[in-house]
Image: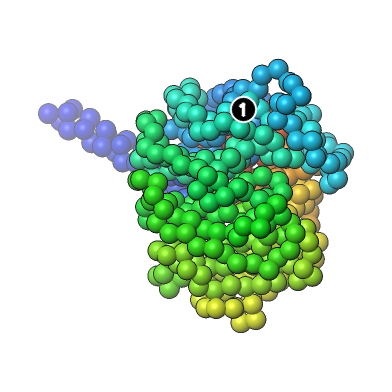
Amino acid sequence: MMKLTTALALAALMFGSVAMSALQSGAPKNWPQWRGPDGNGISKAKGLPTTWGPDKNIVWKTPLPSWSGGTPIVWGERVFLTSASKAGPRTADSGVETRLTSQGGQGGRRFGGGGGSYGQQRDAGGPALMLLCISRKDGKILWERELDQGNRVWNKQNASSPSPVTDGKHVWVVTGTGAVAAFTVAGKEAWKRNLQKDYGNFGLNWGYASSPLFYKGKLIIEVLHGNNTDDPSYLVALNGATGKPAWRIERPTDAVRESPDAYTTPALLVHGGKPQIVISGGDYVTGHDPATGKELWRAGGLNPRKAPNYRIVASPVVKDGMIFAPSRNRPLLAVRAGGTGDVTTSHVAWKWEETGGPDVPTPISDGKYFYMIDDRGMATCLDAKTGKLVWGPERTAVGTVSASPLLADGKLYIINESAVTSVIAAGPQFKALATNELDGDYTLSSFAVSGRNLFVRTGTHLYCIGN
């Protein structure tokens, strides 16, 4: 009896230690949307790897049919991601965009060999647009479903750029062709529809790329466009269970030529216990009632000179009662939550109009510090409340950066288009911690986190990285 009691006590002690370790690790398993649970690129995980390489700290890697800007999401033991189908032999009509230019390329790469400079000509991938479900445990592809046909490439991206979103029961996805679909996590189709068939053709200069937001049973999608259409920009909320429209509202703008176009993703703001959907693009950042879509407030100033080419790529960031709205490099606006109507004068707390502002990568903030990564990989840190410069711009690995950074465990993870990740210390002093290479292939996707693992897709593979 004594031996049994002792054994039970030891077992209980061991179980308690494991459970406490898991709790202390702060390692949630779910990364349900682009930029994580709160849509801000911050993970509470501890013990994430700082160093890795092609043969170091790789738990598994899975070949993918094609490249994509879509970021993987994770729920439980499943990883979901979008992709074009596998490309066949290249032909004259294989989907290569003929308007590509060479402007804006960042030469002088120090790391990697296969990254995609801005304007580099590439195949779109295959014609089909796919949703893949992959085992988190071993990287095995569990199922794949076709979403639509008609993939093509626009400069940097193809039609699989929008990232999916899940609530653990269903997964929803939008494509650059306008297809919107819902599946159970087991792969059963729930519904499909197409935004372009419902509301008119997209009119963006560089293709549709906004990821959806799922909130309180509604799939909220923005279409901000104007370069190639006279149709108005709009927001639409679809019932997540049925796909039927819950509401649709136009979002007016006086932006000109390409400036109405936005490739941003909606952000969720909760202020004073009341939720709002924050949308950025078309020269303005706006807040909307998620129940009706009604515009609650609006701040101008993202394009003070009314330039005709001020499309916006970097998404709005919400943290601790502040809304950070990037533009095309500069200015960047920091807006205090709580206003109604036109808040351009009353609620803009500060502006950043110096060098180092982001264009494509969305910034990140922990509420105290605000971090920006520009397209050249230069990192800058500001005081989040005042906009005062803390440090930067500082050089990370040479190469173009399109993915948005990750903040976790006191570190910033910055991956460039050659799949080279710079790990730097978060906080008031700049400190480079590591530079990690993978396969050197074209990488647009941001990191996902689950448990103590990082997930990243390059142009050829999905990687699970862990110590």
x then y, percent, for residue 114: 77, 29
Residue at point 40% right, 36% down? 183
The N terminus, quarter of image? top left
Task: State whether residue 125 is above or below residue 268.
Answer: above
Task: State whether residue 301 is above or below residue 110.
Answer: below
x then y, percent, for residue 12: 26, 37
x then y, percent, for residue 387: 69, 70
Q: Nearer the viewer, residue 317 or 206?
A: 206
Residue at point 66% right, 72% down? 300
Q: Mark 1 points at which residue?
A: 127
- Report which quarter residue 64 is drawn in: top right
Asked if one can make out residue 424 in the rendered structure from this viewpoint, the answer is no
SS assignment at label 1: loop
- How packed is label 1: few (under 14 Cα within 10 Å), some, or many (20 or more)? some
Q: Which of 452 and 30 is in front in this view?
A: 30
- Is 101 displayed left or right of 96 in the figure? right
**Disc 1 residue type (three-letter):** Pro
Q: How many labels does the image show?
A: 1
Residue at point 31% right, 41% down? 16
x then y, percent, for residue 222: 55, 55
- Residue placed furthest toward the left: 1
Asked if one can make out residue 202 in the rendered structure from this viewpoint, the answer is yes
Residue at point 71% right, 54% down? 227
- Report which quarter residue 103 is drawn in: top right
